[in-house]
Image (tube, rainbow, N blue to C red):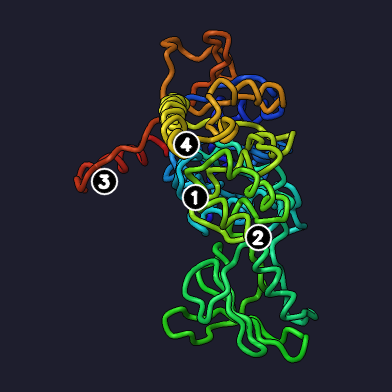
Amino acid sequence: MNLTGIVPALLAEPALRAAVEHVRARGELDVVGPAGVRAPLLAALSGAAGPGPGRPLVVVTATGRDADELAAALRCYLPVDDVAVLPAWETLPHERLSPRADTVARRLAVFRRLAHPEPDGPAGAVRVLVVPVRALLQPVVAGLGELEPVSVEVGAQVDLDDLAARLVDAAYSRVDMVERRGEFAVRGGILDVFPPTEDHPLRLELWGDTVEEIRWFSVADQRSLEISDRGLWAPPCREILLTPQVRERAAALVPQLPGAVDMLDKLAQGIAVEGMESLAPALVDEMVPVLGMVDEDSLLVLVDPERIRRRAHDLVATTREFLEAAWTSAAAGGSTPLDLSAASFLSFTQVRDLAAVRGLGWWTLSPFTLDAGEPDGADAGVVTSGVRTLQVGARDVERYRGEVERAVADVRALQQAGW
């Protein structure tokens, strides 16, 4: 649903207008108002639905569900491709379980867009990046934005063997028949591949070395469906690819982790195994924070900051305990200790310090404020504890819970009052 027509009316409210006018500020600001004003305000701050130039936004939420719901609301005010969600792993950083392939591919697609945005389309620049705090706190392998997706369009000249090798290098599994995300199959001049970011797999039909047609197909009966107008765009399925350097490091780790010999032996042979991501700090050169990958002109906005702070504290405490327990037995008897703390969640304070160093600002959208005073001045702003606060003159929607007569009476009263 397109709701862009609502934005100009909302910006007539002094506090919302003041927030948009100060979007270039890199300090701290707290906007207090009901949840309903958040999506249109963020759209206006980004510049796509507001009067000013705006700036890219990094919007932090307490949970993944909150992130998905906010992104859905934002797409009512912004083009669909302008909004992206960076999902968090379903596993803890040191847990010997791998995140799902579709989660990893969605993350890598976002990192690619941040590092190398295309002029337009689903791989274009991200105007609003919505990040659950769990994804924000977790360091990632440096250089993920440089991993190129396997991309093919109709009419392209390709070598089928080379294309299959590129998919293997991107951690896709070769099978006889594609049934799950992250798989591909080759039959004659046909390549089936299921990118984890797509709802359906794709079938590439070649005539010689020329891609004649790219269609979706059904997993259930393998029958071709409609033509794909976007071609093939398949990001990698793992955040650690088994390059020669990674395989050498895995072999060198065997004396240090006697309890993980099976895992390390397979990695050294180039075989991806469950839980390999837990060894990331030892297998790669560097881990970097997510905030280090966003545009330097971005504005950091926290939605419900108290919930985010509590969630961050719980995550840090949990991952610390898990790190101490997960690898103690695995390293028993090892010749030297192994430090995997580089993959641990950052603290809330560390994230705030990094935002200050990069000049990303620290804006919050809160449902309430501790200040009991009335807004002061034309811009509805007050200053509490050194942080400027804008109090929005709005309230939450009344929940009538099936009381139709009361709802109609309230609508009639609003109409009589001139609304």
> How far apart are labels 2 and 1 at the CA level?
30 Å
Rendered image quadrant of residue 175: bottom right
Location of residue 396 by image quarter: top left
State the image coordinates of residue 344 (x, y, percent, origin top left): 53, 32
Residue 408: numbered disc: 3
Examine the rendered structure and indicate whether residue 265 appears above or below residue 191.
Answer: above
Residue 65 drawn at (x, y percent): 42, 45
Q: Which residue is mark 4?
A: 327
Among the two numbered marks 1 and 3 on one chain, the one whose residue lies closer to the N terminus: 1
Mark closest to the chain's N terminus, 3 or 2: 2
Q: Earlier in the sequence, mark 3 or mark 4?
A: 4
Q: Is the C-beta separation of discs 2 and 4 under 8 Å? A: no
SS at mark 4 in the image? loop
Where in the figure is residue 296, as x and y percent of width and height?
Answer: 74, 34
Query: Which circle marks residue 122 in the picture?
Result: 2
- Location of mark 1 (residue): 275
Question: Left of 155 or right of it: where is 129?
Answer: left
Total residue callouts: 4
Name which residue type carries label 1.
Gly
Alpha carbon separation for disc pair 3 and 2: 43 Å
Say what amino acid the circle numbered 3 marks: Val
Which tag, 2 or 4, sits closer to the chain's start? 2
Is mark 1 in CB contact (under 8 Å) with mark 3?
no
Q: Secondary structure at mark 1?
A: loop
